[in-house]
Each structure stands twice: as C-alpha cells, then as structure tokens.
Image (cartoon, grey):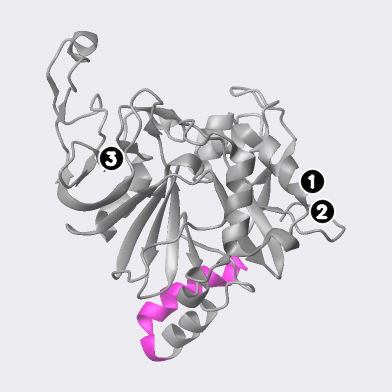
Amino acid sequence: MRSFIGPLIKAAFRRPPVYSALFLLLTTLPVLFPSFAEGGEYFYPFSSSDLFRSHAPVIGSTTTYTVQKKDTLLDIARDFDLGFDELRRLYPELATWMPAAGMRITIPRMWIPPRPPQEPNKREIVINLAEMRLFLFNFEREVFRSYPIGIGTPENPSPTGSFLIDEKVEDPAWTVPPGLEDEYAISQVEPGEQNPLGQYWLGLENTHYGLHGTNFAWSVGRATTNGCIRLYPEDISRIFSRVNKATRVHIVYEPVKFGVKKDKVVAEVHPDLYNHIDDLAAHAYTLLQKKGLVSSVDMNKLRLALQRRSGRPVNISPEAGTDEE
C-alpha cells in the first residue's frame, strides 16, 4: 500500500483538482486504508462521526519487523516512533542492548484514540498519560498523528486537565526546578546539546509544565520527568510546526479503553502508572456498563487483558478465534 501512497500525496500538491479529491476519498476509508506514512511519519484517517460515538473506533494496523544484529530494543522503538515501554511490555524477554537477531516481532501501531472535546477546534492535542501517547487531531482533514511521550514520575506526576499553549519557543533555556539545583550545580542551562528541553518548548498556560524535546531520547516512553511531557526531537519539531498559541491540550489518564472494530469489542489496557485506580477490573466493568457493552464481552478474555496490560488492542468478544487485533 505504501508504495503508491507517497507519490499520490506529492501529486496532490502538484495537481490539486484531480489528485487532491482522490486523496481525500482515500482518507475517508479507514477500514481499507488504516494508516499511511510520509517522510518517516505516520498518520491515520478517521471519521468525526465515528470518533464521537459511544463506541470508539479502532484505528491503524500492526506490522512486523525482523531484529537485525546491530539493533537494540531502544533503536527499534525509535525507528518505529514507539516509546521504549511499548515494546518492553510486549517483549519482556528481549534483551535491551542485544535482542535476539532474526526474531520476528510485532510492531504495535493500532490505537483506540482518546476522545477530544465534543466541539473541537481545527486542531486538538489529547495526551493519555497512562499509555504515554500524544494524539494530534486535525479536524479539517480528519487525520490524526500519534507520538510516544515521556511523562512525570509517580512522585512528580504530569497534570491532567485542559490547557492552552501560551508559549512557543525555539532553542529554549532551561531553568532548573527547585530542589534540583544541587544535582546540576547551576540554576539555568542555556540552549545546546546539554539542554534537557531540546530545541523546542510548548508551554501550557498558567502552569510551569510544557511539551518539549530532549537530549536523552531513550527516556521517551518512560515515567522519568518532573511533570513535563517529553518527546523525541524529531516528533516535537513536527508538532511545533503544526500548532499555534491557543491550541488546546487535553491531558487525560485512561489506562483502560474500549473500542469496536468490525462489530467486535476491543480492549486496550495499560498499567496504572500513578496508582489512581483502586480496582482496575471494577473500573473496566463500570466503563463497559456505561457503553452498554457488557453482554458483548467474554469476561475471561477481558480478565486476561487486564492481567497482561500490554497496551495492545485485543479482541474480547465471545466468538471463537484469536484475541489479538
């Protein structure tokens, strides 16, 4: 599929009347064309009407990759724009620095996207802390892009709520947070390779938090920050160019999500990183009740998904067959 998508997109800009219409038609068919890649970046078509149904859609697709001798698990994650823990949870047996060469692994690129506001602007950012993912929705073209993130530690958690971007800064200086001055022996780090903020900063209104790059890429996909949202350098540069001041950022905490794909109920379960939920199984059942899906679910499959907490969407409908989407 990808062999013709790239040229088609480029042609759309050269000859808008014909190719743009064809491209827009393709992006309204998420079942047939679940994901696209252009310039090393993935994007996913969606239908606004589907996105705001009580039963969320399942978008994207998985692929496979054969581990090479030169690979580390960290390299593979970054090459496919995944956070480290997204692969680690699927393959806990793989060595971080020398995974087994020749092994064929699944690359998870399928999402149950978190829901933006009912009356969205042209572009909205939704961050789900529990899955350590950022979703950038473009409602004009009905496509979204998704990026892995690093988040705050349990001791210094990232905030939830709705915020506006009120700062866009290239090459920011980093003011060392209170309590860390002794560790860094300095109060401010100037722009450059040693700056933990990387090359871009998107500040959130009325907070000291923001979205930024990093000089330590392998921290993406982990809970290691003082509350800010950290991205790969290449991803924050893409986001920086697509958002403006006053773009809304909605930060949620959803370790359990349910969606529907081809009339099958699908569950996506992530670890409860911040221990916000006393009983994950009871929480999941309550969500199913709210969505009217209890009678459509095999509870044994749901129980297994809750135990694994792999972050990968799995089929939990009662019919026979594989439980993986």
Query: For the residues marked 1 and 2, what is the alpha-carbon distance in whole angstroms?
Result: 13 Å
The correct choice, above or below, for 246 with respect to 99 in the image is below
- Give the image location of residue 196, x and y in percent: 27, 28
- Give the image location of residue 77, x and y in percent: 54, 38
The correct choice, above or below, for 258 with respect to 155 in the image is below
Disc 2 versus disc 3: nearer the observer: 2
Q: Which mark is residue 322?
A: 2
Disc 1 versus disc 2: nearer the observer: 1
Is disc 1 surrounded by few (<14), some (14 to 19) or many (20+) residues within 10 Å?
few
Query: For the residues marked 2 and 3, what is the alpha-carbon distance in whole angstroms?
Result: 39 Å
- Earlier in the chain: of badge 2 and badge 3, it is 3
Residue type for callout 2: Thr
Q: Is residue 285 visible?
A: yes
Mark 1, residue position: 300
Q: Which mark is residue 30?
A: none
197 or 2, which lies in front?
A: 197
257 or 231, which lies in front?
A: 257
- Give the image location of residue 261, x and y in percent: 66, 66
Considering the image in quadrants, where does the N terminus appear? bottom right
Mark 3, residue position: 212
Residue name at image x 48 percent, y 77 percent? 49
Side of 197 where 70 appears, left or right = right
Is disc 2 surrounded by few (<14), some (14 to 19) or many (20+) residues within 10 Å?
few
Residue type for callout 3: His
Proximity of marks 1 and 2: CB atoms separated by less than 8 Å = no
Name, please, the residue furthest toward the bottom.
17
Q: What range of the chain is rendered magenta?
A: 1-17
**SS state under label 1:** helix
Query: For the residues marked 1 and 3, what is the alpha-carbon distance in whole angstroms?
Result: 41 Å
The correct choice, above or below, for 278 with respect to 1 in the image is above
